[in-house]
Image (tube, helix red, strand yellow):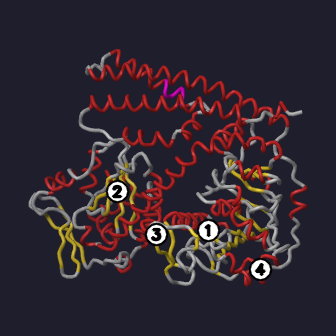
Amino acid sequence: MNVYEKNMEILKYKNISLCKDIEISSDASIKESTRDKIDGIKVISAVDNNNILEIIKKNHTFRMNSIYDINYEVEKWLEGIDLQAIKKVVILFGFSNGFYIEKLLSKLNEDDVIIIFEPSMHIYKFTMENFLLEKILEDTRVYLYIGHKDIENFRRCLRQFVYINNIATQTIAALPQYDRLFIDDYKAFLNIIRENNKSVMLGENTNAFFGKIAVENMFSNLKYVKNCNIINDYYNVFPKNIPVIIVAAGPSLEKNIRYLKDTKGKAVIFCVDRALEFLYEEGIIPDYAVTLDPIKPAEYFGKGSVIDIPLFVEINSSSKILDVHIGKKIIYDPFMFLDNILYKIGKKIDGGNHFGKSVATAAFAIAIQLGFKKIVMIGQDLAYADDGKTSHAGANMQQVLKEDEIWVEGTNGAKVKSRYDWYEYLTWFKDVIELNADKGIEFINATEGGALIQGTKTMKLSEVLESLPDNGIDIKKIENNLSPTYTKSDLNKIERYVMNGIDELVSIKRKASVLIKLSDQMITKCKRNSQEDKTGRNLTERIMKGNEYIALKSMYPLIDCYITDVSRSIMKDIYQISDNQQKNMEDTFIQSKQIYQLIIQAADEIKSIIESKFEPWSKEN
């Protein structure tokens, strides 16, 4: 068995898809796999007898390692890698002959991760043929992506491993010569990382911003569980040949909204909350509405119209909107605490698809989950109108900061002005469409303007409707056949869990108070450099057990959500350490003490919210 066969034998157990890509790649095809093509590659022997790569491009020769002392060169390169942080994420541009990566792995901890993007299949296949890569290929800390075909997988890997607590300590590096050999690819690599970091910050800022209000909304909205349906109740309810039209509130909506008058009996209309007023003004009553945001004002929900159509909701959606809506609520996302309760009573809501971060992405995910085979979108611009200012239907203007401005491909082939948060939604749509590619769903973008949504077919709404037969679907009949999901017995169980949650909050507060005292003792011991003695080890063990006690309580996820806005800055400091182990431990207990103080405050406030917002069903007449 030669070197290539040995490498492939190992790789097939870890990444069979990459194995297949390597096997089917020919010399001609791999040379075309990068925008910056190389002309040749060979192995040469260095002065220290190590084999190194030499690459030729446009009559220039690039040695990928030192010709004299590769070990010294690698050690100098490693000095630029931050090895102090815990749970490190190292993102590398280039694989080369694997020497740098193997040395880096020897310096990392078991819970660290290396994400590698190698732009050239030509280089990677050559390396597989000439260097034994066993230590790298078998290491579970390594995630490897090759060439443009793997860019989306690389992007998804970043989303998996880069989050708010380690975003500041992630290490980004190019192997020597790679940034010169693959200039365009390196720029794209850095841009993907930059986009991911923006996404992380956007998501974290959203969670932090919504944390407290989401908890308040959940307990205010629990009263609607009594007569609600859940998304599970709608599985196999709609005929397979019936399409769904999702109406968003983009600036192009006014171009084709009138055609929706001709859809009755032909399609099911899902309308996002903000677009309701425009449909009602045209005398068009959609079949279902969808809401998501915890803080969306009630005036964005129909603007004075009486909305009594069924409404898809998250249990932590704006309580103001749920209160002005007088129709049936359909819960598609139960939020963490209620989700745990429903699981315990055997009536769990099937989350299915991830619902994204906008009401339009939520409506799209719901449509997929309910089994629609033709999904049509209108008003889904994800870009400003031609004037560069109008963000929503009704000439709504939203100011865009220059740093948030981005230009993306439009449905007409030209670039259109967008924003980074909308670009996030564009990426979400593309990813979800790809993930559902094997389900036989036809995705149509009938927005007639705005950004191009990859994976969709662009059509005019009038053309879509002309092709639809009148299927005679009767939504009222479907709704009349559905009884509320939860029985009186279910509601009694839910109520007991909620009321027991108050007792849990008292217990968590008591435990956090104890942990503050233990942390103070450990801070004192750290100052005296006695943290490792028998008493110090005992204190540390008690603190760890106390942390576990709190984390296992069903109310803790709510507390964690509630304090996110403040705790995230503390947690980022915990992930950054120095060479002074004594100081690191002291800082950790100081920061832990701050978290316990936040937990106590949150426990008190959530207890007050439950007592003021939740209306027990057992007290109803």
- In-image side of 485 versus 44 (left or right): right
Where is mark 2, residue-wise? 91
Name the mark on residue 405: 3
Where is mark 4, residue-wise? 259
Residue 548 is one of the magenta-drawn residues: yes
| Residue found at x 32% / y 66% | 124
10 Å crowding of disc 3: few (<14), some (14-19), many (20+): few
Residue 454 appears in view = no
Q: Nearer the viewer, mark 4 or mark 2?
A: 4
Name the mark on residue 437: 1
Mark 3 to mark 2 CA distance (whole Å): 26 Å
Query: Where is 169 relative to 236, above or below?
Result: above
For marks 4 and 3 on the same chain, the one whose residue lies earlier in the sequence: 4
Q: Amino acid at mark 1?
A: Ala
- In-image side of 98 versus 542 (left or right): left
For marks 3 and 1 on the same chain, the one whose residue lies earlier in the sequence: 3
User: What's the magenta region?
Assistant: 546-550
The x and y percentages for residue 471 are 86, 74
Q: Amino acid at mark 4?
A: Tyr
Q: Are marks 3 and 2 in contact (CB under 8 Å)?
A: no
- Image quarter for residue 593? top left
Instruction: Kindly state the secondary structure of the residue where label 2 is placed.
Output: strand
10 Å crowding of disc 2: few (<14), some (14-19), many (20+): many
Q: Nearer the viewer, mark 4 or mark 1?
A: 4
Q: Nearer the viewer, mark 2 or mark 1?
A: 2
